[in-house]
Amino acid sequence: MENQIARKYTKEVRIGNRWIGGEHPILIQSMTNTHTEDIRGTIAQIQQLTAAGCEIIRCAVPTMEAARALEEIKKGITIPLVADIHFDYRLAIAAMEHGADKIRINPGNIGAKERIQAVIDVAKERRIPIRVGVNSGSLEKELVEKYNGVTAEGIVESALNKVHMIEELGYDNLVISIKSSDVLMCVRAHELIADQTDYPLHVGITESGTITSGNIKSAIGLGMILSQGIGDTIRVSLTGDPLEEIKSAKIILRTLGIRKGGIEVVSCPTCGRTQIDLIGLANQVENMVRDIPLNLKVAVMGCVVNGPGEAKEADIGIAGGIGEGLIIKHGEIYKKVKEDQLLSELRNELLHWSE
C-alpha cells in the first residue's frame, strides 16, 4: 500500500476497528455536515462517505441530544466515529458513554484541570483515544505575545503544552492535530512537531476554502507534509459536500504514490483541435470509473490527432473525433466506435479488463 516515502515513526493508536501510526496506512477522514441529532440523515451521509472511501468519520457534538444520538448512529455505520467537542466536558463524557471511538477536544477550552481529569478518567476506562486539537486561530494570547504573532513555533508549543498536561494527568493514548489556514505555516508546524513527539498526527489545512481554492491549498500543504513522511491520517477540509473531501484525499494520496488502487483518470487540456465535449466526457469518465476495482490509468483525449501518442502512458484511453472516437490500449489504436458509444465501450472494456 505504501510507496518509498520513509514514514516517521509514530505510536500505534487504535480507533474503533482501525489503527493509525506505526506502519499502518494513512487513513482518510471527513466530517458530517448533518445535525448529529438527525440520526437517520447522519447515518445516510456516513454510509455514502464510507462507500466513497472515508475510513474515519467525525461528528459534531454540540448538545447532549447529539451525544446520545451517537449510540444509534454507531449501529448503522462500519467505520470509527470521532466526537467533536468544544467547551463542555460533560459532552465529551456523554459521547464516550454512547459509543464514540475517539474524542476531539481542545483542552484549552474545556476548562479547569478537574474537568479535563474527568474526561481522561472515562477515556482511560474505555480505552478511547483523545485527539488534542490546536488551531492557529485559537492560539493563546501569551504565546502570540511570546512569538510576536501567530507562528508555527507557537502552534507547536501550544499543542505540546496540552499534551504534557494530559500526560501529567495520567493518559497517553493521544493523537495530535495542529492546523492553520496558512499553508506554509501549517507545513512548518508539522515539520517542527514531528521532531518533538512520536504521537500520531492528524494532518489537514483548516478553513482551506471552497472546492477550488481548498483543493489547491490542501494539495500543496498535504503534499509537502506527507512527502516528508509526516502524517498518519488526513482530512481535506472543504467548504462543500464532504464527498468532495474524500475524492480529493484519495487523489492526493495516489498522486504521492502513498496509495495504490482505483482508476486514475488523466485528460488533456482543451484546445482548438478538440472535436468533442471533452470537459463533459472527462467528468463522465471520472464518475463512471469510481465503482470499478482496478489499478489502472485511463486517458481521455480530445482529438484523434494527438490522442494515441498522448495516451501512451495510460493503460487504456479514448480520443474523440467528429462523430466517432478511438479506444486506445497501451498507446495503440484498438478500435473505432461511434462518438455516442465511447463511454459505454470504455466501461465495457474496463469491466472485462485483462492484460
Image (cartoon, rainbow, N blue to C red):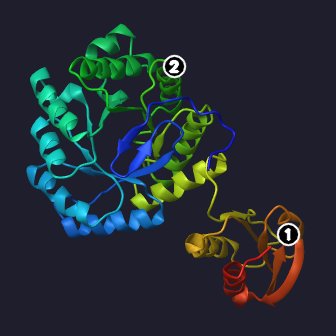
**Image point (14%, 26%), residue name:** 117
Query: Percent x, y for residue 262?
Result: 62, 63
Compared across the picture, whether 342 is left or right of 227 comes to right
Snapshot quadrant of residue 78? bottom left
Which of the marked residues, 2 or 1, is nearer the chain's N terminus? 2
Would you say 107 lies left or right of 13 here?
Answer: left
Q: Is residue 328 above or below residue 189?
A: below
Query: Hey, which quadrant is residue 309 in on the image?
Result: bottom right
Q: Residue at x 18, y 37 (%)?
A: 125
Q: Categorize mark 1 by other alpha carbons within 10 Å: few (<14), some (14-19), many (20+).
A: some
**Label 2's element?**
loop
The amino acid pointed to by label 2 is: Asp
Return the residue at label 2: 195
Q: Which mark is residue 330?
A: 1
Residue 285, position in %: x, y? 64, 74
Q: Left or right: 271 with respect to 205?
A: right
Mark 2 crowdedness (10 Å alpha carbons): few <14, some 14-19, many ≥20: few
Q: Residue at x 25, y 60 (%)?
A: 74
